[in-house]
Amino acid sequence: MEFEAVIGLEVHVQLNTATKIFCGCKNAFGASANTQTCPVCQGHPGVLPVLNREVLSKAMTAALAINATIAPETRFDRKHYFYPDLPKAYQISQFDMPLCSKGVVHITVPRDDGTQYEKDIGVTRIHMEEDAGKLVHDEHGEPVSYVDLNRAGTPLIEIVSEPELKSPEEAYQYLTELKKIMQYIDVSDCNMEEGSLRCDANVSIRPKGDTRLGTKAEIKNMNSFRHVRMAIEHEIKRQIKAVENGEQIVQETRLYDANQNTTRSMRSKEEAHDYRYFPCPDLSPQRITAEMIAAARAKLPELPNAKAARMRDAYGLSGQDIAVLIETRALAEYYEAAVAAYPKQPKKIANWIMVEVNAHLNDKGIPITAFTTVPPKHIGMLFKLIDDGVISGKIAKDVFADMITSGDEPSAVIERKGLKQVSDTGAIEDAVKKVIADNAAVVAEFKAGKEKSFGFLVGQVMKATKGQGNPKVVNDILRKMLG
Ligand SMILES: [Zn+2]
């Protein structure tokens, strides 16, 4: 029997507001344990939560970015469970009146044969909730656990996809696209290592063509997109094997172990009724007005797909180039600012940024936003100097290396280092004469018809002019003098 997989993802995104969702404590990663807490986020009895307006605004912007419908009224509920990182023993979340529903994320999925296909993945809902604290185990080798409540009360949105993903690769592309969108709209840095983006996967299998959903397992503990893909792949295989062996799939939560690339059972999966959801009496329902939605919509920048389409038309770049350049909003903006400074070479500037600039960023391990010594207009200036014949493309690399360290404009670097291209025919003629005299054997080969020798002689003249001879002038004079 052939099986197909059905995958749904639950993605938690920490919002990058200045303060927490229900109190005024700072919302920032990395502070000393329990230094960003107060009675509200410590869960003392009798305190009252107050909703941070910015959380609602960012959550609405996220909803609009994936074309979701925002509810006219939304409400917070208490989700009850006991765990040491949740001192009040309930999480303020949303249950039956989430902020929004019915969104869509458009993905492009590569096939093994090099082709690709496009697909829309439905988003069931986005709701707001608070994060829990964090347990720190075995610190300094002591067999004890500590509780750090800095994270308690960090605003989250949970984005729940429809079970419409059919393969680990589709799940991977969905996450990549969702992360890109959340970063573009600046609601989160989506840093998986710091936990600002977390993902659980619901995986089930069914006989191919069947329309009923099989029993699902929820996979947790994946800390990179690559691990999400591997964990799902493993889980699909595990379930198929189990069914083929006549076993029943049980609804449960399984933990992914990246070292072993396997999943193991953690606990049987809770049903909604296990959480005893009920409306949070401390927070009144939120009425969402048209003005509030309009204000959130006004904060939407150009989104990745729209940017890709516009850039393809405006600059004549390939799909592959575009994919690299729009990877982050900052890189796309850097590129467009460079082209705006010198609009005649959009393709060459794209290549320069993808090769030279990216090599530097990778080497230093910094994002484009930290690349401050070379503002984009200096890249534009560099290409104007190449087109004007002031420097060759080869010398441009040396000029660029200097620009990175000095922060100078390219023309200043060229002036300071005397790198101006030599187009003066007298100086080049002298160099050509000397090269011809010094390389009699090669000259003879060329005259006997070996065209390759010409390239060698050009190289010698370029060397004699320290790479600054205008290549076209060098070629012309050399050919003339060789008769
Ligand atoms: Zn607090």
Image: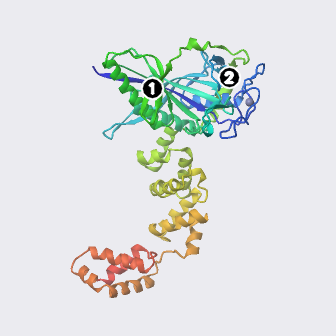
Pointer 1 or 2: first along the chain: 1
Which quadrant would the N terminus be assigned to in this image?
Answer: top left
Instruction: Determine whether, in the image, residue 295 is placed left or right of residue 350.
Output: right
Seen as rendered, the residue at the extreme right is 46
The residue to which callout 2 is attached is: 289
The residue to which callout 1 is attached is: 264
Viewer-side residue, 447 vs 368: 368
The Cα–Cα distance between marks 1 and 2, rounded to whole angstroms, is 46 Å
Q: Nearer the viewer, mark 1 or mark 2?
A: 1
Give the amino acid type for the residue marked by disc 2 in the picture. Thr
Residue at point 57%, 70% (across, down): 413
Image coordinates for residue 120, horizontal then vertical, percent = 44, 28
| Placement of 137 over or under 90, stated as above or below | below
Q: Secondary structure at mark 1?
A: strand
Viewer-side residue, 138 vs 130: 138
In which of the image's four quarters is ligand 1 placed? top right
Residue at point 27%, 73% (across, down): 452
Seen as rendered, the residue at the extreme left is 448
Q: Is residue 6 visible?
A: yes
